[in-house]
């Protein structure tokens, strides 16, 4: 579904990503892990079109999308749930969800998606008329995920979904992401600091360090590597 081939990104002469190659097949949950500053968020921004790539290609469902604008990538079926949530604080929960679904012409499909979102996150149904800016951090993260789902995406990209959340709330977020993958067959690309949780539920993972992919494999392969166990899994 998604193929990143020899992608490089530079800011002001400094290389943020160098020769990145990764693949996400339909129905997979793929995790990208690594330390702060490794380039994980930059990778997502390059895929969604927020930052410009210097070289390489990004192919989605067989089409090179690197020269297309961010809204065109969203319309193609890529939903990016960004680090820091970025909900619309002066809009209600319902209005935020409707913003996610604005390009969806099928009213029945839209209602089905809203029902699924409210089933995953019942608190959003209870607070659908409440301003998003008055929600807790965890509720805002749920809303950001819901807004992404409202676009009926083919690929969901989650950038640090547990950041700034209490452990119990973060656990709930991971449970819902796992549900989307297992129950809905959602294709997911996940960047996360909580490496053990990110790797445990993934089909495959990539380790990113100083802008380069240094290792890739299944959870079993990565977790059996002494360097990964020591550096990222605390083992």
Image: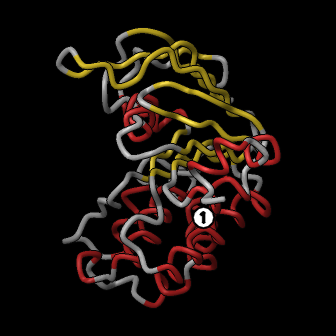
Q: Mark 1 — residue?
A: 113
Q: Is residue 135 left or right of residue 200?
A: left
Residue at the (66%, 17%) spot, across then down: 62
What is the secondary structure assignment of the residue under circle 1? Answer: helix
Q: Position of residue 215 (x, y in %)?
A: 65, 30
Q: Position of residue 149 (x, y in %)?
A: 54, 58
Number of residue marks: 1
Residue at the (35%, 61%) spot, across then down: 85
Q: Looking at the rendering, which quadrant does residue 4 occupy? A: top right
Extreme-top residue of the structure: 55
Q: Tell which of 95 and 47 is nearer to you.
A: 47
| 72 versus 160 height, above or below | above
Callout 1: few (<14), some (14-19), or many (20+) C-alpha neighbours within 10 Å? some
Q: In this view, does 209 lie to the left or right of 45?
A: right
Q: Is residue 36 left or right of residue 205?
A: left
| 131 versus 1 height, above or below | below
Q: Which of the colour schemes (rainbow, by chain, secondary structure, one colour) is used?
A: secondary structure
Q: Position of residue 79 (x, y in %)?
A: 50, 46
Residue at the (56%, 61%) spot, across then down: 110
Q: Tell which of 92 and 10 is nearer to you.
A: 10
Q: Tell which of 199 and 72 is nearer to you.
A: 199
Residue at the (56%, 27%) spot, across then down: 213
Extreme-right residue of the structure: 220
Quadrant containing the N terminus is: top right
Q: Tell which of 188 and 67 is nearer to you.
A: 188
Q: In this view, does 139 lie to the left or right of 78?
A: left
Extreme-bottom residue of the structure: 126
| 205 versus 212 height, above or below | below
Q: Position of residue 12 (x, y in %)?
A: 17, 19
Quadrant containing the C terminus is: bottom right
């Amino acid at each position: 579904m998604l193929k990143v081939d020899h992608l490089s990104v530079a800011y002001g002469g400094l290389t943020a990503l160098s020769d990145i190659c990764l693949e996400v097949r339909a129905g997979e949950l793929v995790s990208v892990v690594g330390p702060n500053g490794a380039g994980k968020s930059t990778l997502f921004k390059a895929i969604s079109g927020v930052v410009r790539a210097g070289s390489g290609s990004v192919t989605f469902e067989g089409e090179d999308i690197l020269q297309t604008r961010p809204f065109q990538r969203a319309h193609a079926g890529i939903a990016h749930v960004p680090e820091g949530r970025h909900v619309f604080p002066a809009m209600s929960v319902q209005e935020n969800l409707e913003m996610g679904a604005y390009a969806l012409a099928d009213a029945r499909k839209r209602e089905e998606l809203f029902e699924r979102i409210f089933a995953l996150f019942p608190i959003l149904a209870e607070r659908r008329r409440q301003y998003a800016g008055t929600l807790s951090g965890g509720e805002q993260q749920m809303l950001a995920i819901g807004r992404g789902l409202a676009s009926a995406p083919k690929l969901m990209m989650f950038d640090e979904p547990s950041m700034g959340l209490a452990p119990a709330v973060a656990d709930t977020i991971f449970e819902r992401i796992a549900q989307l993958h297992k129950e809905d067959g959602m294709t997911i690309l996940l960047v996360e600091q909580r490496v053990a949780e990110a790797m445990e539920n993934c089909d495959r993972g990539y380790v990113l360090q100083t802008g380069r992919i240094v290792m890739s494999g299944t959870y079993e392969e990565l977790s059996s590597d002494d360097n990964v166990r020591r550096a990222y899994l605390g083992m």
